[in-house]
């Protein structure tokens, strides 16, 4: 047996002797540290940590003594709190706060549930799943979480360019800096001519400035060698090669200055291809205006001035859209906003989620200004307007709101717009010809027949002709310049009515009733047809899911029942139309007695239903849905 002895001055003075010797298995070296004081000897076995980790890994693999279950994207992982808390600041804080509340509850209020009123990060743990033994992790992919747990129990993490982004996301959410460090080192080591664009986007997404600099070196070297036509093609490319419009501008400046004598006359033509309104106002002043030709060239001056004026009028930006302010992408995504999860506290969600079609998963985009369910969202020039709803569940509409907020995906920002004149939830909203329309609903006064219109140009609300009858929990859709309202609840009774509103004449007309009474359903318009889907009706005192799908022909004023019913009961689902399909997200199934977290899709062309891969962060009813174009790279979504 080979023994290596290491002596240092500090070792001698402390009577500590360090030995390294190969173990009998595998040649792994172990060190023994002995400290002598009188007749006592303290011996350190450095193999103990490996033995302990190996033992914990065996317990984890066999699911022995696990005391917490983590759920990500519907997949469960049984773990040990001690292991999670020892490696993750997030779990350490979460479990500690739970213990404090438990201790205080045992001394005081015996009725306390012992569940923390708030977690270290409300965006992560589902409010309805805060049992400290069962945690639903929002925004965490199951693949990323599995790889992170592998590391916690083995000290090894398997990384690839396909998985490193998910591992980074989970490690940042759970605050495990060791894995973040390993992931960053992996990316830095992997950068090459073949993959620098992909790594640059990952670095931008997670704020890895050093990695981004390393990757951008390859990009800049390539760009400087381009000719003018190739440079134009790069600036016009979708998606763009870099993460921001400012980066495109700076790259263009580098290209021009690389050979000023022969290239500078191209400046106006290149600058016309940039979208300066996508650059925040402070950066326009500090980094764009400071470039000489942006101040001296007339064309460049005007481009800069137009962008400045755009930022000076935030409340009218949705009416002032042009190529210069449109996001560099042409891919629409499903968007799900808020909703009511199950649970006794009935606190609505404040999450805005989008569906990543490439990775087949729902991701958190941003946080709403307030919690809300039974509200409406309307897409206007790729802005999302959030209207009304209720910030707490109450069957009598006690907590209905009149708030109106606008989300801008260009800068991940919210602003408040003038509120509606009435508080309302369970209503319908839409946009036509630069006017918003909000119709019916309920509040503390009861069911509403009122209709309001918001002028997007003047920022003013006005009343229009009311519905013929007060309605709530109805559905609506726009077709051929008119608004159609179907079903709903009238003074406690479920109805099958269909109304049509003409905004030019400001009049309502009664149309052919649906074949089935229904409320809390969806009405989707596509290919000159309207589809009434989901919802429920009352039979005696029982709620029954409406499984029939009805199709309405506005020209013939006729309803037909389709041969293919809905896959499962859905009351209060979010609904959106995308790529010739109708999507229903979330909702409540009365027959199953369960809130839904899945998304189902109906293709009128095929006459069939399918279910999307991936689930929303938590089961929801009463969300609002739309579609949106997001930046190809989301540097704010970490």
Image (spheres, rainbow, N blue to C red):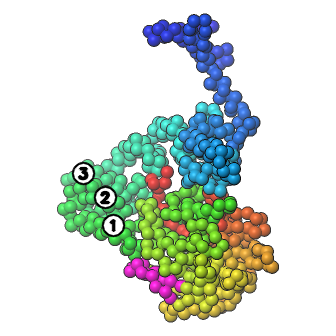
Instruction: Measure the C-alpha gap from mark 1 to mark 3.
Output: 28 Å
Q: Residue at left 27%, top 58%?
A: 285
- Predominant SS along the magenta part: strand
Within 10 angstroms of label 2, few (less than 14), some, or many (20 or more) residues? Answer: few
Q: Secondary structure at mark 2?
A: helix
Span colored in magenta = 451-464
Which residue, given by chain and number where applicable, does mark 3 sit on? 257
Give yes or no for contact between labels 2 and 1 (Cβ–Cβ under 8 Å): no
Which residue, given by chain and number where applicable, does mark 2 sit on? 282
Mark number displayed over residue 349: none
Residue 426 picture quarter: bottom right
**Residue 458 is inside the magenta segment:** yes
Mark number displayed over residue 311: 1
Within 10 angstroms of label 3, few (less than 14), some, or many (20 or more) residues? Answer: some
Disc with the residue nearer the chain's start (2 vs 1): 2
Q: Residue 453's x, y, as percent?
A: 48, 83
Give yes or no for contact between labels 2 and 3 (Cβ–Cβ under 8 Å): no
Q: Residue 469's x, y, as percent?
A: 63, 89
Against 185, is 2 above or below? above
Q: Residue at left 45%, top 82%?
A: 461
Residue 562 picture quarter: bottom right
Give the left or right position of residue 496, taking residue 377 as reference.
Answer: right
Quarter holding the N terminus is top right
One can see residue 250 in this view: yes
């Amino acid at each position: 047996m080979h023994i290596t002895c290491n002596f240092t001055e500090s070792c001698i003075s402390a009577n500590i002797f360090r030995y390294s010797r190969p173990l009998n298995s595998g040649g792994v070296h172990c060190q023994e540290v002995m400290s002598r004081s009188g007749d006592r000897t303290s011996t350190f076995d450095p193999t103990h940590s490996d033995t302990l980790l190996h033992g914990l890994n065996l317990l984890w693999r066999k699911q022995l003594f696990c005391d917490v279950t983590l759920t990500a994207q519907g997949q469960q992982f049984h773990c040990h709190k001690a292991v999670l808390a020892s490696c993750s600041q997030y779990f350490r804080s979460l479990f500690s706060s739970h213990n404090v509340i438990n201790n205080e509850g045992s001394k005081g209020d015996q009725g306390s549930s012992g569940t923390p009123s708030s977690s270290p990060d409300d965006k992560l743990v589902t409010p309805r799943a805060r049992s400290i033994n069962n945690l639903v992790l929002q925004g965490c992919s199951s693949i990323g979480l599995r790889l992170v747990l592998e590391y916690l129990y083995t000290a090894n993490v398997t990384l690839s360019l396909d998985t490193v982004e998910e591992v980074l996301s989970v490690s940042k959410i759970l605050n495990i800096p060791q894995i973040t460090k390993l992931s960053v080192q992996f990316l830095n080591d992997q950068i090459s001519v073949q993959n620098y664009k992909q790594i640059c986007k990952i670095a931008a997404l997670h704020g890895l400035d050093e990695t981004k600099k390393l990757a951008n070196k390859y990009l800049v070297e390539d760009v400087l060698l381009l000719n003018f036509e190739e440079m134009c093609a790069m600036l016009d490319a979708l998606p763009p090669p870099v993460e921001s419009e400012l980066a495109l501008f700076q790259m263009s400046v580098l290209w021009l200055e690389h050979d000023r004598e022969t290239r500078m006359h191209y400046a106006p033509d290149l600058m016309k291809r940039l979208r300066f309104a996508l650059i925040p106002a402070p950066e326009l002043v500090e980094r764009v205006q400071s470039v000489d030709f942006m101040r001296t060239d007339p064309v460049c001056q005007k481009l800069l001035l137009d962008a400045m004026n755009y930022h000076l009028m935030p409340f009218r930006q949705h009416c002032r859209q042009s190529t210069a302010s449109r996001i560099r992408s042409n891919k629409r995504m499903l968007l799900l906003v808020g909703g009511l999860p199950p649970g006794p506290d009935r606190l609505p969600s404040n999450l805005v989620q989008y569906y990543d079609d490439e990775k087949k998963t729902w991701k958190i985009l941003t946080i709403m200004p307030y919690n809300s369910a039974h509200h409406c969202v309307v897409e206007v020039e790729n802005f999302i307007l959030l209207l009304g709803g209720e910030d707490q569940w109450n069957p009598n509409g006690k907590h209905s709101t009149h708030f109106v907020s606008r989300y801008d995906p260009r800068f991940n920002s919210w602003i408040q717009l003038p509120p509606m004149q009435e508080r309302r939830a369970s209503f319908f909203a839409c946009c036509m010809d630069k006017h918003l329309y909000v119709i019916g609903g309920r509040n503390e006064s009861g069911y509403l027949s009122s209709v309001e219109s918001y002028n997007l140009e003047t920022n003013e609300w006005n009343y229009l002709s009311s519905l013929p009858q007060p309605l709530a929990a109805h559905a609506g859709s726009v077709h051929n310049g008119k608004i159609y309202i179907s079903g709903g609840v009238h003074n406690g009774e479920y109805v099958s009515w269909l109304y049509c509103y003409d905004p030019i004449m400001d009049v309502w007309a009664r149309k052919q009733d649906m074949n089935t009474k229904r409320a809390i359903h969806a009405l989707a318009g596509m290919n000159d047809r309207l589809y009434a889907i989901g919802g429920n009706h009352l039979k005696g005192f029982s709620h029954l899911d409406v499984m029939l799908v009805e199709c309405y022909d506005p020209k013939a004023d006729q309803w037909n029942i389709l041969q293919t019913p809905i896959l499962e009961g859905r009351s209060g689902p979010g609904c959106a139309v995308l790529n010739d399909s109708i999507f229903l997200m979330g909702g409540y199934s009365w027959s199953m007695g369960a809130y839904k977290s899945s998304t189902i899709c109906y293709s009128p062309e095929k006459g069939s239903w399918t279910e999307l891969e991936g689930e929303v962060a938590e089961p929801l009813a009463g969300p609002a849905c739309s579609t949106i174009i997001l930046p190809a790279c989301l540097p704010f979504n970490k």
